[in-house]
Image (cartoon, rainbow, N blue to C red):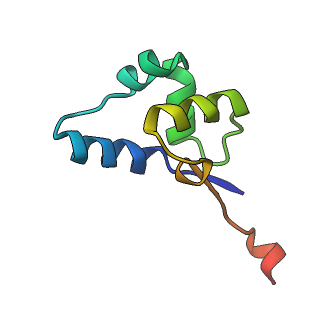
Amino acid sequence: MIRFLLKERIADKEFNEKRKVTLDEVSKATGISRNTISRIVNTYGYNSSTDALDKLCNYFQCDLSGIAEHIKDEEQSS
């Protein structure tokens, strides 16, 4: 399973810039629709495009590992 870390990146940006960062702001800055960003943040197991991930990496100035991480399924780890 892929776990998205978008909430964490937004929180980091808010802390570093000492201001509120909205999903609308991320949407406008990246060109990713507000609905897609909301799904990435809120939908368990959402399947995002690599283009969206690339845009998010550029916006948050981080590697892909800063946006998403792989979590082993419990069945696979048994």
- Displayed quadrant of residue 48: top right
Q: Is residue 5 left or right of residue 25?
A: right
Between 60 and 46, the one nearer to me in the picture: 60
**Vertical relation: 16 (above or below) 58:** below
Residue 14 in percent (x, y) is at: 25, 41
Q: Is residue 24 above or below residue 7?
A: above
Q: Would residue 24 appear left or right of 4 to someone viewing this image?
A: left
Regarding residue 49, the answer to whether it shows in the image is no
Q: Position of residue 3 (x, y in %)?
A: 61, 54
Count numbered badges in the picture. 0
| Image quarter in which the C terminus is found | bottom right
Query: Who is closer to the viewer here, 30 or 73?
Result: 30
Q: Nearer the viewer, residue 28 or 37?
A: 28
Residue name at image x 54 percent, y 38 percent: 57
Is there any visible trace of residue 76 in the rendered image? Answer: yes
Is the N terminus in the top left, top right, bottom left or bottom right quadrant?
A: bottom right
Q: 44 above or below 73?
A: above
Q: Residue at x 56, y 37 (%)?
A: 40
Name the residue furthest left. Answer: 18
Write the residue at 23% across / 47% down.
15
- Please identify the quarter of the rendering in which residue 70 is found: bottom right
Residue placed at 67% from the left, 65% from the top?
A: 71
Instruction: Tell me where residue 46 appears, x and y as whole percent.
Output: 66, 41
Q: Position of residue 8 (x, y in %)?
A: 40, 51
